[in-house]
């Protein structure tokens, strides 16, 4: 009698499970989006599905996952459901990791402060760096540099919801390291850079000086000429960076005379760190500057510049494009 009872119980449980796994779930709405948190156990995942009103209770789903030997294969992330799935379809989705991805875009020319602000404002990101110093962040992502500025490659990064901001920063850092290494390998060996980091600093200045792709090599050529002649770079973006949050949008003559480590009017050579995130175009311009005799350039007011080989020629250009316009 006992074996018959056991057999009937086994058949009943099997039928109960078969009905459960094949019956579509009733979602709160269609389409429906839900998130599974990183580091969750199977029981935690089942509770999250109950809290999201996808499951009515957790135990049958836990049994389904365990019977399939997949308890350790559930993928965290953001999931998007376009119809009412069966528990079996839901199980397959979250063990395959069919996540819907979030994204964040870092723009060429942004500084590290703006980058952190963008991360902090993204609700899909887990904000692990909120209380970290810049030095602590660099240590966590394995960076050897002393300053974070310019170390991250501007691009769009896709990630599953709940991913740590440290993971995104590490990817952006590794991307910049790869782009910089490629550029350094292709450089003209006669350029006055001692390290790839110096090329990165130059690229950041080029990035801030012009948004015109065709002008970047010429801008680079002017700065390379000045470095070779031991002339000061005299570039406004470095001065503005040195002023930090004190800059009110209006660069004054007194600002140009105020000495900071980034004031290239008062100090020779490159500034101590990059001043922004350079993109691929600026990196390439830094290692492939145009062959030019120009030592000066001035904005024409339309986004382009007038390049000059002599101070007399430059003064005429300033009078024409700047003073007359004012």
Image (cartoon, helix red, strand yellow):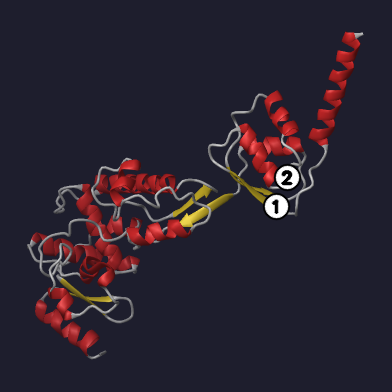
Mark 2 vs mark 1: which is more N-terminal? Answer: 1
- Residue identifier under label 2: 54
Q: Which mark is residue 208?
A: none
Say whether residue 86 is left or right of residue 120.
Answer: right
The x, y position of residue 245, in whole percent, is 28, 69
Residue at (79, 43) in percent of width and height: 25
Q: Secondary structure at mark 1?
A: strand
Residue at (13, 63) in percent of width and height: 225
Circles 2 and 1, Cβ within 8 Å, touching? The answer is yes
- Between 65 and 202, the one nearer to me in the picture: 65
- Between 215 and 244, the one nearer to me in the picture: 244
- Residue identifier under label 1: 32
In the rendered image, is residue 108 in sight?
no
Residue at (81, 34) in percent of width and height: 20
In the image, is residue 298 above or below residue 118?
below
Say whether residue 296 is left or right of residue 42.
Answer: left
Q: CA distance from mark 2 to mark 1?
A: 9 Å
The x, y position of residue 165, in whole percent, is 44, 49
The x, y position of residue 267, in whole percent, is 10, 65
Disc nearest the viewer among 2 and 1: 2
**Residue 222, quarter of the rendered image:** bottom left
Label 1 crowd bin: few (<14), some (14–19), many (20+), radius 10 Å: some
In the image, is residue 316 above or below residue 136?
below
Q: Secondary structure at mark 2?
A: loop
The x, y position of residue 177, in whole percent, is 32, 45
- Between 75 and 245, the one nearer to me in the picture: 245
């Amino acid at each position: 009698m006992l074996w018959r009872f056991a057999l009937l119980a086994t058949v009943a449980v099997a039928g109960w499970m078969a009905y459960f796994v094949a019956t579509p779930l009733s979602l709160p709405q269609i389409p429906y989006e839900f998130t599974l948190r990183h580091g969750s156990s199977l029981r935690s995942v089942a509770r999250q599905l109950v809290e999201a009103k996808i499951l009515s209770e957790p135990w049958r789903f836990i049994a389904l996952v365990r019977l399939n030997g997949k308890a350790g294969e559930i993928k965290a992330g953001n999931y998007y459901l376009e119809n009412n799935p069966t528990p079996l379809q839901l199980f397959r989705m979250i063990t395959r990791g069919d996540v819907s991805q979030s994204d964040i875009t870092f723009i060429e020319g942004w500084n590290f402060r703006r980058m952190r602000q963008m991360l902090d404002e993204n609700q899909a990101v887990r904000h692990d760096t909120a209380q970290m110093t810049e030095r602590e962040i660099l240590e966590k992502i394995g960076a050897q540099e002393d300053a974070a500025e310019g170390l991250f490659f501007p691009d769009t990064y896709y990630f599953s919801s709940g991913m740590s901001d440290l993971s995104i920063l590490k990817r952006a850092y590794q991307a910049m390291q790869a782009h910089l290494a490629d550029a350094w390998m292709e450089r003209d060996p006669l350029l006055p850079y001692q390290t790839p980091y110096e090329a990165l600093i130059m690229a950041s200045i080029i990035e801030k000086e012009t948004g015109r792709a065709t002008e970047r090599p010429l801008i680079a050529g002017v700065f390379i000429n000045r470095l070779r002649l031991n002339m000061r770079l005299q570039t406004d973006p470095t001065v503005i960076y040195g002023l930090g949050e004190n800059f009110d949008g209006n660069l004054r003559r007194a600002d140009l005379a105020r000495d900071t480590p980034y004031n290239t009017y008062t100090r020779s050579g490159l500034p101590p760190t990059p001043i922004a995130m350079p993109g691929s175009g600026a990196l390439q311009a830094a290692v492939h500057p145009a062959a030019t005799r120009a030592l000066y350039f001035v904005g024409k007011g339309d986004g382009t510049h007038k390049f000059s080989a002599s101070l007399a020629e430059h003064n005429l250009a300033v009078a024409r494009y700047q003073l007359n316009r004012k």
